Image (cartoon, grey):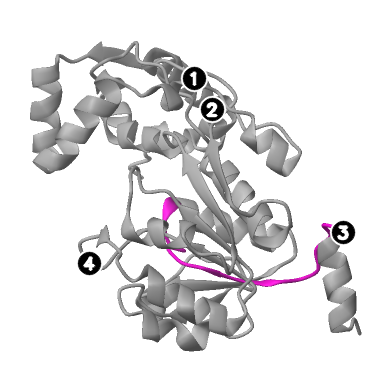
Amino acid sequence: MRTKGDRKALYRRGMTETQKILVTGATGTVGRQVVAELLARGHAVRALTRDAARADGFPAGVEVVQGDLTDPDSLSHVLDGVTGLHLITFGGPYFAPLETGPRILELAHAAGVRRVTVLHGGGPTPLEDAVRADDGVDWTVLMPVEFMANALEWADSVVASDEVREPFVSRLSAMVHEADIGAVAAVALTEEGHGRQEYVITGPELLTVGDKVETIAAARGRDITLLELTEEQAVAQWRAAGHSEDVIGFLLEAYGNTPEVGRTVADTVQKVTGRPARTFARWAADHADVFRARSTA
């Protein structure tokens, strides 16, 4: 059995042993990938959800626990024995910015948490601000650009009519595979050398909307027609889909005037994980069935 001194020596040398990590937002696009990557690296995982009875789809070995980031004291019992904590910045039924960061971190300190990752929410948020100001843990801010999983929004129209209808089709994106976000998080949560860092996480290439559509078409084995919408047509389509005016405004800005960070390839995945970032072609191949016609049998 390793002594406390043995464990400290391992950490100083940058090596890892089995650690226990609490993942909040565990049912989300990124959270599930953080869980999967930690498990693949041999660590113990607690997946936090507001309703443990309704949580499903987690791999075997994941400990599902109940708690709510809007009620930090509900986390006290699930932090016992935890060495790392993955946080999101929005919570509650309406996904409002969380203002409970100071109390969450107070509980994390009391439990002996050493490392914290926080998923950047697209702009300044109270919880991320609290994490950045904390000197008691090694924190890492994860700043992914557009998710490859966003392409799933096209699945219904592709299946129904072999079409994608989008504005600003020449826009460039360094979109990132969600599994690579999980991989960077898993390393930062379990290894030394990532404290006080913010990591912009991208894929390995720049893609236009047309590039993405062609890649999905190749993966599913059937052509897809790309129809470019005007801004007015796009707004009407988004409203019909139920998007709020705030979301529509964000989409117009993000797609019509993509910031430089969103269209610049970074080598973060390679540097942190030791392997290249996953391509969109790989993502499309893994999700090809989603874009194929469903059987009516």
Q: Is residue 243 visible?
A: no
Disc 2, SS = helix
- For image coordinates 15% across by 24% down, the residue present is 234
| Dot 2 or dot 4, earlier in sequence | 4
Marks 3, 1: nearer the viewer: 3
Q: Are marks 1 and 2 in contact (CB under 8 Å)?
A: yes
Instruction: Name the residue that disc number 2 marks.
Output: 280
Instruction: Name the residue that disc number 4 marks.
Output: 93
- For image coordinates 18% across by 40% down, the residue present is 247
Q: Are marks 4 and 3 in contact (CB under 8 Å)?
A: no
Range drawn in magenta: 14-29
- Foreground residue among 154 and 12: 12
- For image coordinates 59% across by 42% down, the residue present is 180
Disc 1, SS = helix
What amino acid does circle 3 point to? Answer: Arg
Q: Residues within 10 Å of mark 4 (few under 14, many from 20)?
A: few
| Dot 2 or dot 3, earlier in sequence | 3
Marks 4, 1: nearer the viewer: 4
* Residue 172, position as x, y percentages in the image: 41, 17
Could you tell whether 126 is left or right of 197 in the image? left
* Residue 186, position as x, y percentages in the image: 64, 56
Q: Is residue 80 visible?
A: yes
Q: Is residue 222 above or below residue 86?
A: above
Q: Is 44 part of what is drawn in magenta?
A: no
Q: Gap in Å between the C-alphas at discs 3 and 1?
A: 42 Å
Instruction: Name the residue that disc number 3 marks.
Output: 13
Q: Gap in Å between the C-alphas at discs 2 and 4?
A: 32 Å
* Residue 209, position as x, y percentages in the image: 37, 18
Instruction: Name the residue that disc number 1 marks.
Output: 215
Disc 4, SS = loop
Q: Is residue 282 above or below residue 52?
A: above
